[in-house]
Amino acid sequence: MIFLSSATIAPMRFLWLTAVLSAGVGVLAAHSANVWLDTRIALIGDAVGLQHSTNPGIAWGVRLPPVVQPILILVALIFLSWFAWRNAQTRIAQVAFGLVLGGGAANVIDRLPDGLVTDFFQVGSFPIFNLADSCITIGVGLLLLELLIERWRGRAE
């Protein structure tokens, strides 16, 4: 299989390494919250803390029909994997796509037993979120930064 040869995997090693690490840490963090986080732990008064919550929806609790949601998530991850494979040429892009894919995979794995995602970071009145969500957000931020850097370099040349 040419798709899985060392010639095709080696250039994307940062993408896959980041994806596997972020997925693993995201799943471990969610499992830890499920096991040990019984009551809210204040980190900065009422503003920031650890608080166990579950979420049946996708981003910010948005719910889709039960049949549509897993299909949409799976299609999105497959498309994003394909897109990253074809377009992540720089290390920053590989790490960014790896964070998004790993975070998405962690949320899918967390959702498998009961259809719920475990959330545990509470910041102000913002919806409670988890480490996988943070990976996705940071990855998207890095992709935007990469676009800005490329645009800036294009103007400088």
Image (tube, helix red, strand yellow):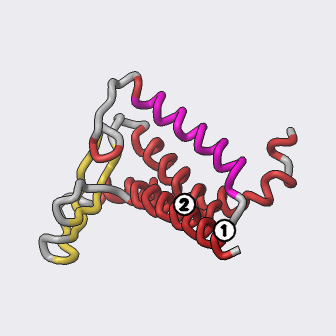
Label 2, residues with CA under 10 Å away: few <14, some 14-19, many ≥20: many
**What residue is drawn where x is 63% and y is 44%?**
81
Quadrant position of the N terminus in the picture: top right
What type is the residue that disc 2 sits on? Leu
Quadrant position of the C terminus in the picture: bottom right
Q: Find residue 70 and report its horizontal and vertical position in percent.
A: 44, 31
Q: Find residue 55 and report its horizontal and vertical position in percent.
A: 28, 43
What type is the residue that disc 1 sits on? Gly
Label 1, residues with CA under 10 Å away: few <14, some 14-19, many ≥20: few
Residue pointed to by mark 1: 154
Q: Earlier in the sequence, mark 1 or mark 2?
A: 2
Highlighted magenta segment, given as a residue range = 69-88
- Please give the label number shown on residue 105: none
Residue pointed to by mark 2: 143
Do callouts 1 and 2 mark residues in contact (Cβ within 8 Å)? no
**What residue is drawn where x is 22% and y is 68%?**
49
Membership of 83 in magenta stretch: yes
Membership of 29 in magenta stretch: no
**What residue is drawn where x is 63% and y is 66%?**
150
Q: Find residue 97 and report its horizontal and vertical position in percent.
A: 58, 55
Looking at the picture, tell me which residue is in the foreground, 53 or 90.
90
Describe the element under mark 2 as helix, strand or loop. helix
The main secondary structure of the magenta stretch is helix
Instruction: Give the residue furthest to the top.
Output: 67
In the rendered image, which quarter is residue 21 located in? bottom right
**What residue is drawn where x is 12% and y is 71%?**
46
Describe the element under mark 1 as helix, strand or loop. helix
